[in-house]
Image (cartoon, rainbow, N blue to C red):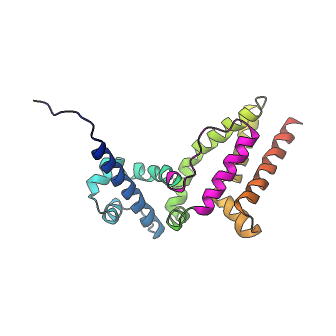
Amino acid sequence: MSPRNYKSELREAQAEATRQRILDALAVVMAEGVEALSVPAVAKRAGVSVGTVYRHFGDKAGLVRALMPHAIQRTGSVVGEVPTSIEEMDEMVRKVFRHFETADDLIKAAFASRMGRDARIEWTEERLEIIKESLHHLDQDLTLEQLDHLGKAALILTTSDTYREWKDRLDLTPDEAADEVMWTIRTLLRGVRS
């Protein structure tokens, strides 16, 4: 007799709650400045077994990879569709900067750590592709080389590190920082076109 395969909404909700608890625990461990990530430390902080962590994330790398989407979801900075106009890009930058500003201290501390920086760097390639796709919508005549250069510049202009510089050095609000970033992106696009 084979086991029944059935979906249980309650079981799925419990699994998702456990997954979120593990990722929150990972953020705490990272925020504490631990140099080397320890799955047992994360499991202990989450109140689950080490096996549960592995069952949800596969391995340590899978656990760390899951942190960025978790942080994005937790801060509400999920970007829906790829912006296809300069107005949509402007709104996306504003939304992201506003969420950087309102991110809770735990997420900020986790990403300020060395492991957090490594997690953000892993996410860079995907962000770069989204930005390049958006820039291509803005100007379909851009060459691949131009897209690459502009994409890298726009990526750096929209990171949380750069946002902190806008805020700390120039005392700009999220919207004021977004205005500066979009002015720069518009100027770069005009420069490429001329």
Please report the residue visible at 42 percent of the width from the left and 60 percent of the height from the top: 24
Horizontal side, residue 146 vs residue 116: left or right: right
Report which quarter residue 47 is drawn in. bottom left
Magenta run includes residue 162: no
| Span colored in magenta | 73-102
Q: Please check the rendered image and state whether residue 97 is part of the magenta-colored stretch, yes or no.
A: yes
Point 63% across, 43% down: residue: 128
Q: Nearer the viewer, residue 99 or 23?
A: 99
- Which residue is pictured at 38% across the width and 53% down the height? 60
Is 166 drawn above or below residue 132 in the view shown?
Answer: below
77 vs 167, left or right, is: left
Quadrant location, the C terminus:
top right
Q: Quick check: can you spot residue 145?
A: no
Where 49 falls versus 192 (above or below)? below
- Which quarter of the picture shows residue 149? top right
Residue 127 lies, in percent from the top left, at: 60, 44
x and y, in percent, of residue 59 in the image: 36, 49
Asked whether residue 190 appears in the rendered view, the answer is yes
> In this rendering, would 127 be left or right of 35?
right
Give how far across and how far down residue 147 sits, in percent. 73, 37
